[in-house]
Image (cartoon, helix red, strand yellow):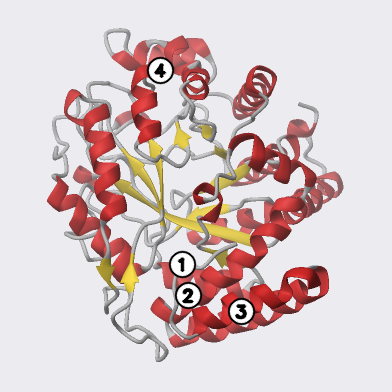
Amino acid sequence: ACLLHVEDPAPLAEMRQTAAAVKLKVYDNRIVTFAPLYLSNLCVNDCLYCGFRCSNTEESRHILSHDEVVREVEVLAGQIGHKRLIVVYGEHPQSGIDYIASTLRTIMDVKVKIRRGWEGTPNATHRGGGTGQIRRCNVNAAPMSIAELRVLNDAGIGTFQVFQETYHRPTYETLHPRHTIKGSYLWRLYCMHRAMEAGIDDVGLGVLFGLYDGKFEVMGLLYHALELEKRFGIGPHTISFPRLEPAHNTPFTQNPQYRVDDETFKRLVTVIRLAVPYTGMILTARENAQLRREILPLGCTQTDASTRIGIGGYADLLDEAQHGERQQFLLGDTRSLDDVVRELAEAGSITSFCTAGYRCGRTGQKIMGLLRSGQEGQFCKLNAVITFREWLDDFASPATIAAGEKVIAKEIAQIKARMPEVFEAFMSYYEKTRTGERDLYF
C-alpha cells in the first residue's frame, strides 16, 4: 500500500530493479507467449465498457462452429507456431459449458502440417511435413457453478481465468446492470473458490484498470490472492492487468474518470510483482509496442503476439486492419509473433513455448512450491531452450533465427554451469530436436 504512493525517482528505480530481480529469481529470463482465441461475441450481459454488451446493436454477432474453430487453430498452430492459447467465451446460452468443453477438445485434437503462412516464409532449416498443435488451452469465461467447473476440468483446461473487472463494489454495481447475470458481485468474486472446490487448481485473477482507482484495485487483487492462499494454500497462477481501451460504439471508454496513465501503470505493475512474487504476470497487446518494451522488464512473464480478437480473426481477417464491429476492444500492438520473439531475443530473453508442467502434473501446490522456492525458473530453463529451438527451426525468419541462436548459446552455457547433473540428458533432447524430433520435454 505504501509503495503504490511512491513517486520519487530514486525509490521508484529501486522498486523497478527489485521487481526485475524477483522475476529473474522466480521465472529466470523466460517470457511465455500465447494467442487469444475469441470463439463467440454473443453475450447476455450489458457491461457499459464492453463492445460485446447486449445493447450494442452495431456489433456483428457470431459464434464459431467447430469447423471454424479448426480453421482458426490451423492458422495459429500451423502457420504462426503458437502452442498455447487463451480461449475466450462470451456469457450466453449458446456458448455454455457444453460448447466450451467440446470446443476445447476440438482445439486440442487439431494437428496440422506446418506450412508457409501470413507470418512469412519458413526459415531454411524448416523441413516441411512437421506437425503444428496447440498443447495448452487456458480459458477466459464467465463464472460457473461447481458442477459446470468439474466438466471444464475434465475437458483438460489449463488455467481458468476470470477477471473481477473492479473490486470496488459500488462501481461494479453501476457498470453491471442488475438484470444481467454479471450483475451479482459476490457470484463473480467467489468464482475461484468454486473452481478450487471443483478441482481446478490453477486460476488467473485480473482487473480492468480504468474502471476505478488503480491503487484500490491492486489492493483488491492482493487480498484476493491472500484469501485463496489462506483458504486453499494456492494463490493465483497468473494475474492480468489490462487497461480500459476504446471499443466500437461504446461511449463509456472514450473519457473514463479513472483512466490510468502510462507512468502510473508502470508503478502498479511493479507493485503487483513485488506483492505477489510467485505469480505469473500477463501483459497483453492492449498496450502499444513501445510501452510493452518498457513494462515487460518490470516483472512480466507472459505476453501475447500475432493477436487478433475479432471472431474468426485468424482465418478470415488476414490483413493488419482491426474490425471494430467484430471485436471487444481495439488493440495497441498487432505485431507478428516472429517480430515479438526477435525483439525479446535481442533484449536477452528467451521465448518459452513449453507446456510440460500441465502435462506432467506440475500444477497447484506442486508448481507453487517450486515457484516460492525459486526452483521453477531453473527447472523450466531446460524446456524453454528445447521448445525455443523447435519453434525457431519450424517458424522463424532468418533474422529471428540469428537473434535466437545467440540467446540459446547463452542459455546452454548457463545450464552446463548451473545444472551439470542434467546437462548430458538435456543436450541429448536438444540434439534430437535439432534433427527433427518434436515435443520433447523434461
Percent from the top left, x then y, of residue 241? Answer: 54, 38
> In this figure, which residue is indicated by the disc labeled 1?
439
Percent from the top left, x then y, of residue 413? Answer: 75, 79
Q: Which of 250 and 26 lies nearest the eye of the viewer?
A: 26
Left or right: 339, with 36 as reference point: right
The residue mark sitting in front, 3 or 1, is 3
Question: Alpha-carbon distance for marks 4 and 3?
Answer: 44 Å
The residue mark sitting in front, 1 or 4, is 1
Q: Where is residue 351, by image quadrant?
A: bottom right
Q: Which of 10 and 283 lies nearest the eye of the viewer?
A: 283
Left or right: 405, with 377 as reference point: left
Label 1–label 4 contact, CB within 8 A: no
Residue 176 in view in this figure: no
> In this figure, which residue is indicated by the disc labeled 4?
146
Label 1–label 2 contact, CB within 8 A: yes
Percent from the top left, x then y, of residue 405? Answer: 59, 83
Depicted 402 relative to depicted 12: above or below: below
At x 55%, y 57%, the residue is 292
Label 3–label 2 contact, CB within 8 A: no
At x 24%, y 46%, the residue is 324
Pick whichever of labels 3 and 2 is earlier in the sequence. 2
Element on which disc 2 rests: helix
Which of the labelled discs sits on residue 428, or is there none?
3
Q: Residues within 10 Å of mark 1 (few under 14, many from 20)?
A: some
Question: Alpha-carbon distance for marks 1 and 2?
Answer: 8 Å
Q: Residues within 10 Å of mark 2 (few under 14, many from 20)?
A: many
Q: Quadrant of the N terminus?
A: top right
